[in-house]
Every structure is written in C-alpha cells, then in structure tokens.
Amino acid sequence: MSKKAIILGIETSCDETAAAIIQENNNGTPNMLSSVVSSQIDIHKEFGGVVPELAARSHIEKINLIVNKAIKESGKKLKDIDAVAATAGPGLIVCLSVGLNFGKAIAYSLKKPFIAVNHLEGHALSPKLVKKLSYPYLLLLISGGHSQYLVVKGLGKYKRLGTTIDDAVGEAFDKTAKLIGIEFPGGPLLEKFAEKGDMNKFKLPEPIINRGGCNLSFAGLKTAVLKISKTIENNQDKYDLAASFQKTVENILHKKTKVAFAEFKKISKKNKRVFVIAGGVAANERIRKNLTDLALKENFEPIFPPQILCGDNAAMIAFAGLERFKLKKFNNLNFPVKPRWPLDNKAAFLKGAGVKL
C-alpha cells in the first residue's frame, strides 16, 4: 500500500497563529491528525481591535512553538511531511509574511514541495474536511474581513455572485459590540446580548437590500448603530440594540441569499444543490438556523463546517494544500505575499465611494 500524503499547514493571516497536520486516508478522504490555534485576544483587547505590528510580533514569537506542537500532537515527525502549505493571502501583510516565510523555510530544509494557499480557498473547502462534497456548490463566506457569495466550481475555480461593497459582516458585528461596551472580540458575544433584548426596539437600515443583486453593504448599518449607541441609558438598551442588530443582519443575509439561490439555479441544473456557509460569522447560531431553514425551503442542502473550523485555522490550509498536492500544483519559494487575493480574479473590484451596482 502506497504512503498517503502528509501535509503541514500554517496560518498567520491575522491574529491567530495556527498549524495543523492533515493526512489522506486510504479512501481519499482527509484525516486531521492535529490542529493547533493560538489566539492573540489578550494582546489586542486593550486596543479594541487587531494591531498589525503587535500581531506580527506575536506570530514571530510563537510560530516555531505552534508548528512543533502540531507535529508532536500528530504523532508524526518533521521528516514524514510530504509538503508544506502556508497562507499567502489575503490578510495583513506583516502577519502573512511570518507564516509564509516560515513555511518556505521548512519546505526548503526538507527539500519538499511548497504550496501557497489562498486563505479564502481554505474557508471555501473547509466543509470537505468532514463531509464529501461534489462540485459545484454555492458558498456564502462571512467573516471579519470578507462577505461574499461564490459558486465553487472546483479547486481554484470560482465565480463570484456578490460581495460587500464596503464592510464585512464580521466587522459590523465587532464594531457594534464595541459601541455597546462588549469587550474585544465582541462579535461572538453580541449574540448572547441579543438573547436578552427586544429585536423590534430599534429600526435599523438594510442597505441596498432591493438592488445590487447578491452584493452586500454594512457601512450604513454601522453608522445607524453608532447614532443609537449615543442615546443608550442602561443595560436593557444595550440588549435591545444587540437584538435589533442581530435581527437586521439575519434579514439582510436571508434576502440576499434568496437572490443568490436564484442565480445559482441558473448555473447548476443539478437536482441536489448544496449551500455551504463558512467563515467566523458562520458560528453565529441564529444566522445558522435562519439560513438552514431558508436553504431547506429552497431545496438546498445547508452545510456548515464544525464550529472549530469556522474561524481562522490551519487545518483548512493544510487540506487546501493536500488538494493541490494531489494535482501537483506546487509553488516556487519566491511566491509573494498577497494581502489582496480574490478567488475570482475576473470579478470587478466593488469597494469605495461611487461604486455602481
């Protein structure tokens, strides 16, 4: 029996230092041997957001320890690794450089292939770590840095149906949480606040909800929250604002996803259609339920990665690396950092003032 590929994945695109080992099983499915993630929440908490220079410094301090821990927990040795996959973008350039260069150094020292991975492709493929999926499928990627609808046609083959024209939904969650006094990173905790509030207390805008196809916008929503936050008088007001915000985001994603479903049906004539929701915001239970109910009603099978794979992690990077390894899609060691690296290179850039939809 031939040896199955073992891939080391490294992720440092923002404020998590992560490493993982993936091995292909005999039936071709992936086996996650280890996944180690070191968070920097305590470092950035006092600043209310990620400070790139501090994040990069922390990556430099931890990367060797995290990679060694991932290798040890996998039960393998460094020499057993068949290839090294590292995130090359998109993300914070000073952070990306740490993991990318560390991965290149390991690959060079072992004389093994190096694979540069798009962080977004890691999220796009992450459900395949735990479930067999066939192409094409519809993807909603919602995180702190990205909000887009994509058709996943195959490895490296993506068609963008819609994207945010300003802020990502995860950023809107974090900013709203900060405005109502929830400690960084407040996005995940905002849902808990919302459980105690009246979702109909505050009327918030749903930007470009009836135009722009599948494109999204959250800047106007953030501005409305900012104005209301200045009038807050007690904790109940905070809970009510959190609940109103949560409901508004759910409504936006619900309506835009219906548009995306209609667009996907034009592309895919398959009877069994799959809808994948990935990224950090996919961990939000209310959003999960809302989109699951909608998908089932529209005859789509809703699929979410496990909670531990929704946020940034190296297991998804290792898996994307494994998929590319099997096709011998390797990269040179001079592959550059790509702070901006869209999955669909043909899609128009839709950010900034004056964007026409």
Image (spheres, grey):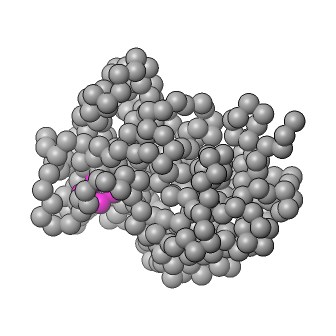
Give the residue drawn at x 49%, y 65%: 89
Q: Nearer the viewer, residue 217 or 10?
A: 10
**Which region of the structure is painted magenta?**
164-168
Quarter placement of the N terminus: top right
Asked which quadrant contains residue 30, the reply is top right
Q: Nearer the viewer, residue 240 or 85?
A: 85
Q: Is residue 131 above or below residue 175?
A: above
Residue 111 is left or right of residue 15, and the answer is right
Residue 64 included in the magenta stretch of the image:
no
Residue 211 coordinates in the image, percent (x, y): 13, 43
Residue 57 visible, this orientation: yes
Asked which quadrant contains residue 170, the reply is bottom left
Q: Is residue 310 above or below residue 314?
A: above
Residue 349 coordinates in the image, percent (x, y): 26, 60
Give the residue drawn at x 76%, y 51%: 6
Q: Nearer the viewer, residue 330 or 140?
A: 330
Residue 166 included in the magenta stretch of the image:
yes
Residue 185 coordinates in the image, percent (x, y): 47, 62
Give the residue drawn at x 60%, y 68%: 332
Residue 287 visible, this orientation: no
Residue 6 is left or right of residue 150, and the answer is right
Give the residue drawn at x 83%, y 44%: 3
Residue 37 is left or right of residue 77, and the answer is left
